[in-house]
Amino acid sequence: MFWQKELETLNRSRLEALQLKRLRETAARVYGKVPYYRKLFKNNGVTPAHLKALQDISKLPFTTRDDLQKNYPDKLLTIKHHDTMRLHTSSGTTGKPKAVFFTRQDIDVAANNIARCLTMTGVTKKDVLQNMMSYGLFTGGLMMHYGAEKVGALVIPSAIGNTERQLMLMEDFGTTSIHLTPSYALYLSDVLEKKGREFRKKLKLKRAYMGAEPYTEETKNKIEKLLQVKVYNSYGLTEMNGPGVAFECEFQAGMHLWEDSYIMEIVDPKTGKQLPDGESGELILTTLTREGMPIIRYRTRDLTAILPGKCKCGRTHRRITRIKGRADDMFILRGVNIYPQQIERVLMSVAHVEKNYQIYLDANDKMTVKVEITKKLFDGDLDKLKKLQLDLTERLRAEILIRPNIELVEPGTLPVSEGKAKRVFDNRKIY
Ligand code: AMP
Ligand code: ZN
């Protein structure tokens, strides 16, 4: 089923012509209205007039996470504050967040893209969608909500957590589709399993939309079996409107990325050079329809590849593979984006902590930080050790919003690597 058949199946030459037109408009808009972009373009010796063909996008500079943070809170806006309607920020907590503003039209376009996603997997106004993503600054809640409302489905804004209540709502209101993170899906499956088969039979559940975090094909299969649903992969990021950037269709052979809203490129993460379809690299996205805060060549740091060839569904928007990893060392734990440097900063600001530390993530989404402390403290009073442990736990919780286990170890116990230190040991096998 299609939400906007004509646009979703537009032939490639017309789609690319539309992209070029929108790219030129977007470039002219930021060049004219955002001093930061104008300077950046000038420093790179380009102006919007250089955009004669779609390939000319490679002449434009990249925008990075740092650029967004440097321009916090609103220096990338092309319009006045009072013309914006909504603010979202990334779930990460490194320094200032990445703030993204939306106008009425921006919200409408984002919701429309989500409506396409839901429709292509069979959702209609007869469906009941329970949105188990957190509502708030995170886009997973509100943006999906607006998209599902556009389709006309009944939306239950249950948000994440309170699993017994989730199951009650699912039973009482005939939920057919759920939107959730893979880690919450695993938890939900556990609770559902304990309720027994008879309970599952009462539910009308057919589909689960899973995203916001990386997960493997194996996890997907496991959840499909446990929840007895079809799991559809959903990719998005706050900087690009949140969910609905790329989504699996009914054939589930990669995720269609809506190319009338974004130009996608795959580049070598080291050199920044474009790679051909089929090769893995970093996904770069340029917004084509954003009014309030357009972003040029955003380095998502997500690793994927463009799937060559046509999809059986007839949509002409190209597909990307499951996200294969990150080009930086960010990891996502229980929906929160975390950088090892955040943890390092906290550890290093506390007395008696030595230089070496390691972060372990286990299959149950628990984080353990092993940290070397001074010999004197390690051999000393147990009460003092406990106090330090508690202090570090609290400080880290304040910084990364997750309470880690802290293991204090003797200096010299953790291996010292010769090259780049390996800090994070991810045993969740998510990629
Ligand atoms: P946020 O802006 O906080 O929503 O986080 C966006 C990031 O979540 C992306 O850049 C990806 O690293 C990750 N992400 C979102 N959806 C998926 C998905 N379906 N598979 C893998 N990673 C995802
Ligand atoms: Zn398709």
Image (cartoon, rainbow, N blue to C red):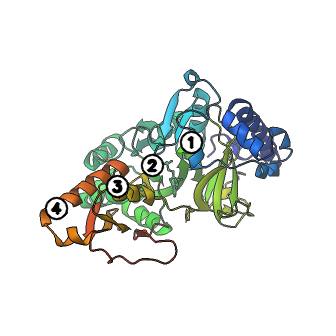
Q: What residue is disc 2 on?
A: 92
Q: What residue is disc 3 on?
A: 349
The span from disc 2 to disc 1 (Cα, nearest Å) is 15 Å
Instruction: Judge left or right: residue 22 versus residue 192.
Output: right
Instruction: Judge left or right: residue 287 versus residue 324.
Output: right
Q: Please report whichever mark, 2 or 1, sits nearer to the chain's N-terminal start.
A: 1
Count of labels in the image: 4
* Label 2 beta carbon less than 8 Å to ligand 1: yes
The span from disc 1 to disc 3 (Cα, nearest Å) is 24 Å
Identify the secondary structure beneath mark 3: loop
Identify the secondary structure beneath mark 1: helix
Badge 4: few (under 14), some or many (20 or more) residues near its Cα, within 10 Å?
few
Q: Is residue 73 above or below residue 370?
A: above
Q: Please report whichever mark, 2 or 4, sits nearer to the chain's N-terminal start.
A: 2
Q: Nearer the viewer, residue 367 or 33?
A: 33
Residue 70, which numbered label? 1
What type is the residue that disc 2 sits on? Answer: Gly
Q: Is residue 197 above or below residue 148?
A: below
